[in-house]
Image (cartoon, rainbow, N blue to C red):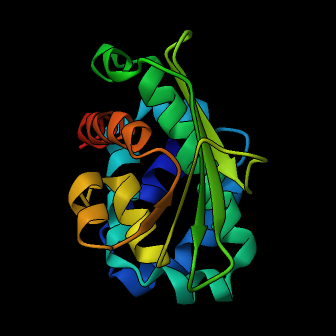
């Protein structure tokens, strides 16, 4: 794990283009070790996720569809670990919410499930049948929502993404997303 951690740290010092080139191999090597990696390196996880804001996501997904799914699985597994270790985020979770994210400019779909009873958050690549909320928009904006670069309420109000489902539920999801992005800064 320490060699992989060193490689990730080195890649994070590179330009966005170089990081994009490194990402497929890094994610392949992280496969099956994400929980351990995030538990040992929450700050490094946050830095890697934060660097996604510098990428042009749609062209990257078009060129690397398998890597895009691997990244989503890495992201959501990491988020699950962050929530499990963050009473501040758990405190924001009050009800069950299921969300499907669909990019409008590339083939990127993902999902998230919030369990209000267990105070957990899970997710991954692919969509859910009959989610509570469906959020769609450009891939960069969806990544920005997840990483905290786009405020959920302001993003919705300024039409950076669309939401299909109860606005009240989206309002309850916003502080969860905000606390989550703050927890790995």
**Residue 12, percent across and down?**
35, 65
Q: Would you say 143 lies left or right of 34 here?
A: left
Relative vertical location of residue 23 with respect to residue 104 in this rendering, above or below? above
Instruction: Please tell me which residue is depicted at 73% across the width and 40% down the height of the picture.
Output: 32
Instruction: Please tell me which residue is depicted at 43% across the width and 64% down the height of the picture.
Output: 143
Query: Which is nearer the eye, 179 or 45?
Result: 179
- What quarter of the picture does the N terminus occupy? top right
Instruction: Please tell me which residue is depicted at 74% across the width and 48% down the height of the picture.
Output: 128
- What quarter of the picture does the C terminus occupy? top left
**Residue 158, percent across and down?**
23, 72
Relative vertical location of residue 129 with respect to residue 34 in this rendering, above or below? below
Query: Which is nearer the eye, 10 or 87?
Result: 87
Q: Would you say 64 lies left or right of 38 here?
A: right
**Is residue 30 in sight in this rendering?**
no
**Residue 5, percent across and down?**
47, 47
**Residue 56, percent across and down?**
43, 84
As drawn, the residue found furthest toward the top would be 117
Q: Quadrant of residue 42?
A: top left
Instruction: Please tell me which residue is depicted at 27% across the width and 34% down the height of the picture.
Output: 179
């Amino acid at each position: 794990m320490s060699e992989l951690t060193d490689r990730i740290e080195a890649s994070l010092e590179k330009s966005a283009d170089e990081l994009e080139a490194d990402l497929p191999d890094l994610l392949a090597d992280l496969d099956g070790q994400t929980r351990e990696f995030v538990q040992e390196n929450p700050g490094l996880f946050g830095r890697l996720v934060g660097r996604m804001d510098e990428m042009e996501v749609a062209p990257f997904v078009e060129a690397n569809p398998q890597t895009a799914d691997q990244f989503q699985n890495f992201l959501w597994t990491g988020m699950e670990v962050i929530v499990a270790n963050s009473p501040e985020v758990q405190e924001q979770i009050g009800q069950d919410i299921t969300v499907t994210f669909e990019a409008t400019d590339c083939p990127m779909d993902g999902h998230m499930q919030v369990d209000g009873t267990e105070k957990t958050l899970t997710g991954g690549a692919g969509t859910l049948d009959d989610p509570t909320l469906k959020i769609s928009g450009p891939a960069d904006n969806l990544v920005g929502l997840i990483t905290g670069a786009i405020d959920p309420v302001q993003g919705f109000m300024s039409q950076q993404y669309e939401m299909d489902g109860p606005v009240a539920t989206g309002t309850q999801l916003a502080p969860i997303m905000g606390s989550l992005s703050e927890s790995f800064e």
